[in-house]
Amino acid sequence: MIGLEDALDLDDPDADDFLDGVQGGIVKGHGRDFTAHVLVRLGPDAAAARRWLADLAAERVTSAAAARRATWSWRGSDGPGEPFAMLLLTASGYRGLGVPEELLPVPGGPFADPRDAEYFRFGLKEQAGRPRTFADPPVEQWEPAYRERIDAMVLLADDDEQRLCDALDAVLASAAGVVDVLVTERGRVLRKKFPRGELVIEHFGFQDGVSQPLVVRQDAEREVRERGNAHWDPAAALSLALVREPGGGYGSFMVFRKLEQDVAAFHRALGDLATATGLPLDAVGAMAVGRFADGTPAVPTTTPDPGADPNDFHYDQDPAGSRCPFHAHIRKTNPRGDVPRVIGAPAEFERSGRVLRRGITYGERPDLVEGGVPDRPATGVGLLFMCFQANLDQFAIQQEGADSADFVSAGVGVDAVIGQGAAPPPQTWPSDGAVAFTMANFVRMLGGEYFFAPSTTFLHGLADTDTDTDTDDASDRGAAS
């Protein structure tokens, strides 16, 4: 029987059955270039909503086992991969389906605290009284759709954009009269050519997705072979992302945040910082992000495979932050030894705070097209941030640290890329002398929610759920959420 205490061994005879019960996209990313994220509010007929979700699960949802088989098939073909889909529920969505409060998913992991359940049960809009808070804009400033009660998300992904559009049209048609579609967000992978190849980037222009916790043993072993592990162990136990549902099966908590990036302001600030420090533009960019634009870490490292993305480094190699400052984005969100060294917490606690990032960029970039407009955008582009974890506190720790000027130690400043705040103090930048310069507020949160990705067993079982108390449960969920 598969347990959560270790990374998944695909050679285990129970691995396929285990993966068949888990939705795809959690253990490994779906890897498609185009996505549609349909955010919905359930209607008053809970039985109809359950049937709609069960039908979607039967017709479209991709299990982790099916996703693995699709990857094998795709590797032997020249065409696009198969379509992909997930279903995710908020706490109000569970309530709207008639699920009792005591059967809502609960956080797991070795450092789980009973209060951590409040993140999911109260939702992202309600931060007051939660274990951790961050500097998000007030709900009144979110985009209108996100101010509404969100009950579920249908996530569709494909490498064939037209096929994705057809699937989206079919899902929207099936939703009519059953749920209210609040908004559909569209994602698109962004790529850029570098001397070492074409790489996936985010809108500020830096390689994205270089370092992920790997919860499959074979994936971790492959990274060690290609990137090395003299300083960094990329492996993680399944318990980093998965929890057992109250009714059996395994699922994962998911954070969804629409983050708008002010690309023009970020690059203006980098130019001003380069002038203030007298350092090259690429060097100050690496100090802000923690990596150069092509993904090379600010802390030097090598790879056994010359073509591999470098990732084998640890901040024990740079304890003073002279190469990668404490306010660098990747050092804030994955401190690699700073927590035990500076704060004194166990290394196991630090590693348990990692998340499985699954975001995708949104928005058009005519300035990156040959012959396009010259100006970088200030609005309209960004990241549909998603991450999976066994405990939403894993995300909250990272976001709180990014917005704090005092993590990992007092006065280091906010995260130089995603840090938010009304009046963040300047960070100190290494150069021939200390330079005080503020890099902050380039990313604005436009809305989001906390979700749970249920097991396929739960989703397929929705069609058989007793409906005797549907009306009362559905009518009460607005107050409960």
Image (spheres, helix red, strand yellow):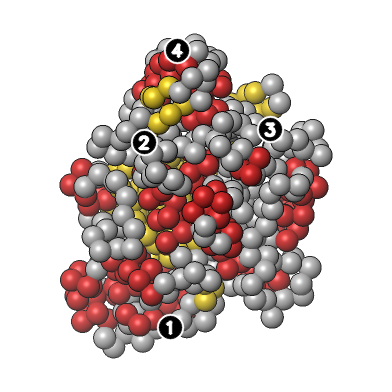
Q: Which quadrant of the view contains residue 148?
A: bottom left
Along the viewing direction, whichever of 319 and 284 lies nearer the viewer: 319
Q: Relative to 299, is 92 above or below?
A: below
**Nearer-N-terminus badge (1/3):** 3
- CA separation, marks 4 and 2? 23 Å
Mark 2 is surrounded, within 10 Å at the Cα level, by few (under 14), some (14 to 19) or many (20 or more) other residues, namely: many
Looking at the image, is mark 2 or mark 1 nearer the viewer?
A: 2
Image position, residue 387 (x, y; %)? 48, 53
Tell me if 342 is positioned left or right of 90 in this view: right
Q: Quadrant of the C terminus?
A: bottom left
Looking at the image, is mark 4 or mark 2 nearer the viewer?
A: 4
> Which residue is under mark 2?
443
**Nearer-N-terminus badge (3/4):** 4
Q: Which quadrant of the view contains residue 186?
A: top left
Tell whether label 2 touches label 4 (CB within 8 Å).
no
- Give me the residue at 36% from left, 87% from top: 466
Indicate which disc residue 275 carries.
Answer: 4
Along the viewing direction, whichever of 191 and 72 lies nearer the viewer: 191
Per the image, label 4 sits on a secondary structure element best described as helix
Q: Which quadrant of the view contains residue 267?
A: top left
Q: Amino acid at mark 1?
A: Asp
**Nearer-N-terminus badge (4/2):** 4
> Which residue is under mark 3?
300
- CA separation, marks 2 and 1? 44 Å
- CA separation, marks 3 and 2? 28 Å
